[in-house]
Amino acid sequence: MTNSIDKSQQPILGNNTVDPATPQAAQWRAAMWKFLLFSALGIALFIIPFQWDGKVTILLGVLTDTLQAVLGGLVVYIAMAIVTISALGALAVKALKPNLHEDSLVKKLFDVDWFWLTTRFLGMLFVWMIYLQVGPEFIINRNTGGVIFEDLIPILIPLFFFAILSLPFLTDFGLMEFLGTLSSKIFIKLFKLPGRSAVDAMSSWFGAASIGLLVTMQEYDKSFYSQREAAIIATTFSVTSIAFTYVVAKTIGVDNNFVYFYLTIALTGFIAAIIMPRIPPLSLKPDTYHSGKSMLDEGIPAEYTTYQWAVNRAVTRAHSMPSLGQVFKRSLNNLFDIYFGLIPVIFAIGTIGLGLAEYTPVFNWLATPLVPLLEWLQIPEAAKAAPAMIMGFADMYLPALVGKSIESEMTRFIVGAASITQIIYMSEVGALILKSNIKLNVLELFLIFILRTLISLVVITSVAHLLY
């Protein structure tokens, strides 16, 4: 082999003089197949949409629906067991103070601070109250705790099972390096983000917001994203899937205009994604990393084309991955962390949020300043629309349920589209962000929610006035 660099050979043989970790010759070819096969599996699971049983979904959605059907009523008892073990385990560790190894799974799952211990205990209390139908209506009503217990959790438990165990195919075998390198210049310029965040956006877009958020959380924990980047991606790119968008459109009665409805949401999301990273609180987040330093380098050496370097990064990442057994073991640990750490939080925060929406005037009060803006934007039935929009902070589906009684189709169109583009809702995405290592608190999430709502209203209303 000569010392000169043959550019035409690099993507095939990995003749790399820049990074010694790049595999060579036979190792390159083996790693290339590893990248192609496992990344194709990740794309098939998380990203490629298709028609199934009368709806547009992804393979992960089909697997989730199948497991949900197999579990049936058993999923309720699984949820109760998870929440109860989570709370009692954390309480035992806090009370007994056992000498746990820093890397032990028990420490990771149950050694939590007092805030999360209280949250887990509330989750356990709520789940038993809802199941036994004992306690205040605020908690046990079908429209509050019942929504979490009967509608949301039976979907999330099988969804997390398949999503967490198969997520490495999407994130760890070179796909993010490949797409990130190809799109890095565009994403840095438009969104002030690394190119690999494109994968987060796609996995949300075709899958579910929680899937994109799980990708973001893991990438932040691995120090591929800074705190600022992770906060932006979590609150800007965790968009709702096409399938759920259609459910909202149908519920609120604008499914006859679904193409325009979805195009409006896409346009609004794109504009919000450009604006939000440039204003507080997201613009004020520090570019610090979970491990103390960045593990990401999207710079392209001068002797490589963008495509050549994208292939090189992808194959090198695939080559560095351990055996599938080790990958599965790590994913299983992450699955337990999500189950025991997140499910109780969703019960606690989601139930309280829905209870406030159903039984208190809190959201009406919060919506009061919004009414003059809606009237200025010439939105019919502004007084009814404003509370529905604010309720989106508790749960994304609430605005559709409340807004379907509004007579004006234009107003229903605006309320439904805004509920999708707001992104932050505490029954799932908000709870997941709070549980993560991304440094965002409830007040910051509410401020981001309000800013996204204001940006969305201007864009959506402008389109709605053209359509109606």
Image (tube, rainbow, N blue to C red):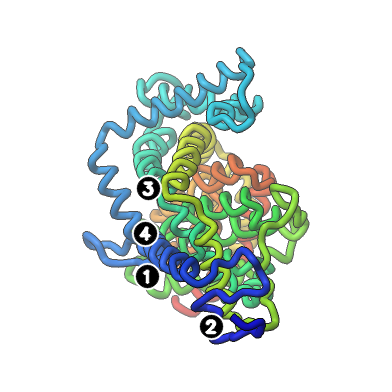
Kindly check if marks 2 and 1 are in contact, taking CB atoms under 8 A apart as contact.
Answer: no
Kindly check if marks 1 and 3 are in contact, taking CB atoms under 8 A apart as contact.
Answer: no
Q: Which residue is mark 3?
A: 162
Of residues 364 and 49, the one drawn nearer to the viewer in this rendering: 49
- Seen at 33% across and 31% down, the residue is 76
Q: Which residue is mark 1?
A: 258
Q: CA distance from mark 3 to mark 2?
A: 38 Å
Q: Which residue is mark 4?
A: 45
- Tell me if 409 is positioned left or right of 118 in this view: left
Q: Secondary structure at mark 2?
A: loop
- What amino acid is found at the position of numbered circle 3 in the picture? Phe
Mark closer to the chain start, 1 or 3:
3
Q: Residue furthest top?
A: 96
Q: Which residue is mark 2?
A: 9
- Tell me if 34 is positioned left or right of 122 in this view: left
Quick one: label 3, few (<14), some, or many (20+) residues within 10 Å? some
Above or below, 2 relative to 71: below
Mark closer to the chain start, 4 or 3:
4
